[in-house]
Image: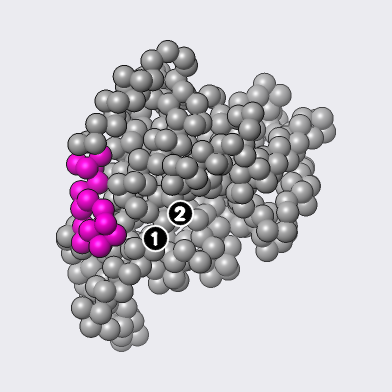
């Protein structure tokens, strides 16, 4: 494929790309030591959606907002969905929360007490009701379940309990609804996390059915883990259901995607593009999962969307024919050079051109800053409790 043809194909793909936003990224967050409040932070899910709509307005590729239950509980979820539509966005994935209740101190779906497990299952059924009310088709499950000490509980029995509980949740889904199971190699448990890796998540979802898949978070791996390998393996099995973008230096830092290692982001997107998983009809949902502790929320989400777009553009410019030829010929340096040629390309003009063709400002960050929205909501959102973790 000629370079000009690759460029046009890349532009077409970038116009169709979509990235989901997390409602919680617009609330206050922080470290174990301090949560820093900012003026204009949303006080309820309706204001979170309004802020998320700003990201979509200036990037054109962020039309869905993921909710977190109970952080985003409202009396009328149908009304919340209509509010989203009025803003030009829609409700995306529904995330459960079984890690902030005293009953879940020793686990939720893996808890040794059947009463607590039933409570955790019932919470997920509540999330499914939210899905029905909002039109969401995807339930995301992340478990903080684990052990701090050897002998604290039976490792095998906990896996059995999780399998049984997940089966009950999966059985409660409608025929057009899906579930994705997230994994994390440590935190908050330190000896064992019950769903610590992609293999464990994959075993559980394969036992459930075709509408259960794995969600991969880039911050949920041990240092040095080859994440693009995991991406390739899950795509081979048709079991990559969702991808949570963020960036990390040491642990689950939840920094802006591409901040720590943009080359890693490019390598991941290369595998995604090779499999065609970047296309809207691929069945893979791409979402930002970040906590903006010191930076302003909306500009940080805009920056993150731009980072994903640029990494995707570079991946789309890889000369796959030349790469394959070099690989089959055993040309190690030649193959590596093909990848590096794409990575070293300055794609910012290309992505800016795509935005202009979509009727958008080529510089979303500057356009948002000039809009005066941040100053407007800072003046209007006075009083009440700002949203954050747990609200």
Q: Which residues are magenta?
A: 351-368
- Mark 2 Cα-neighbour bin, 10 Å: few <14, some 14–19, many ≥20: many
Q: Is residue 361 magenta?
A: yes
State yes or no: discs 2 and 1 in contact (Cβ < 8 Å). yes
Task: Please determine whether, in this image, residue 58 is positioned above or below residue 18.
Answer: above
Task: For the N terminus, give its image quadrant.
Answer: bottom left
How far from the left and from the top, in percent, is residue 370? Answer: 20, 36
- Give the quadrant of residue 147: top right
Is residue 127 among what the camera can see?
A: yes
Main SS category, magenta section = helix
Task: Please determine whether, in this image, residue 204 is positioned above or below residue 45.
Answer: below
Q: Which mark is residue 286?
A: 2
How far from the left and from the top, in percent, is residue 130? Answer: 65, 40
- Give the quadrant of residue 123: top right
- SS type, badge 1: loop
Q: Which residue is mark 1?
A: 17
- Please, which residue is most extreme toward the top here? 383
Tell me which numbered mark, 2 or 1, is placed earlier along the sequence: 1
Q: Which mark is residue 302?
A: none
């Amino acid at each position: 494929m000629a370079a000009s043809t690759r460029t046009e194909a890349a532009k077409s793909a970038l116009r169709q790309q979509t990235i989901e936003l997390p409602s919680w990224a617009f609330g206050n967050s922080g470290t174990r030591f301090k949560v820093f409040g900012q003026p204009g932070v949303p006080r309820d899910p309706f204001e979170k959606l309004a802020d998320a709509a700003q990201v979509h307005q200036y990037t054109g590729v962020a039309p869905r907002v993921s909710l977190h239950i109970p952080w985003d509980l409202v009396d009328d979820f149908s009304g919340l969905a209509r509010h989203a539509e009025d803003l030009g966005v829609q409700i995306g994935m529904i995330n459960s929360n079984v890690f902030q209740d005293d009953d879940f101190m020793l686990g939720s779906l893996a808890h040794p007490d059947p009463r607590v497990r039933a409570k955790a299952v019932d919470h997920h059924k509540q999330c499914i009701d939210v899905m029905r009310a909002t039109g969401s088709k995807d339930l995301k499950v992340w478990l903080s379940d684990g052990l701090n000490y050897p002998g604290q509980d039976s490792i095998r029995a906990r896996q059995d309990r999780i399998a049984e509980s997940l089966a009950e949740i999966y059985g409660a889904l409608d025929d057009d609804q899906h579930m994705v199971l997230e994994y994390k190699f440590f935190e908050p448990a330190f000896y064992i996390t019950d769903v610590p890796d992609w293999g464990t998540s994959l075993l559980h979802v394969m036992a459930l059915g075709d509408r259960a898949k794995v969600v991969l978070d880039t911050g949920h791996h041990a240092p040095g883990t080859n994440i693009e390998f995991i991406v390739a393996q899950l795509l081979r099995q048709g079991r990559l259901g969702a991808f949570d973008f963020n960036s990390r230096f040491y642990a689950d830092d939840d920094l802006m995607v591409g901040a720590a290692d943009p080359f890693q982001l490019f390598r991941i997107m290369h595998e995604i593009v090779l499999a065609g998983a970047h296309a809207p009809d691929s069945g893979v949902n791409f979402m930002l999962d970040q906590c903006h502790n010191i930076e302003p929320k909306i500009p940080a989400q805009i920056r993150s969307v731009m980072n994903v777009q640029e990494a995707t553009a570079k991946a789309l410019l890889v000369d796959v024919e030349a790469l394959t030829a070099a690989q089959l010929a055993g040309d190690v340096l030649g193959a590596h050079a093909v990848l590096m040629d794409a990575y070293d390309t300055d794609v910012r003009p290309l992505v800016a051109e795509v935005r202009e063709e979509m009727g958008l400002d080529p510089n979303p960050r500057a356009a948002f800053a000039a809009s005066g929205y941040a100053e407007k909501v800072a003046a209007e959102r006075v009083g009440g409790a700002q949203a954050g973790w747990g609200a």
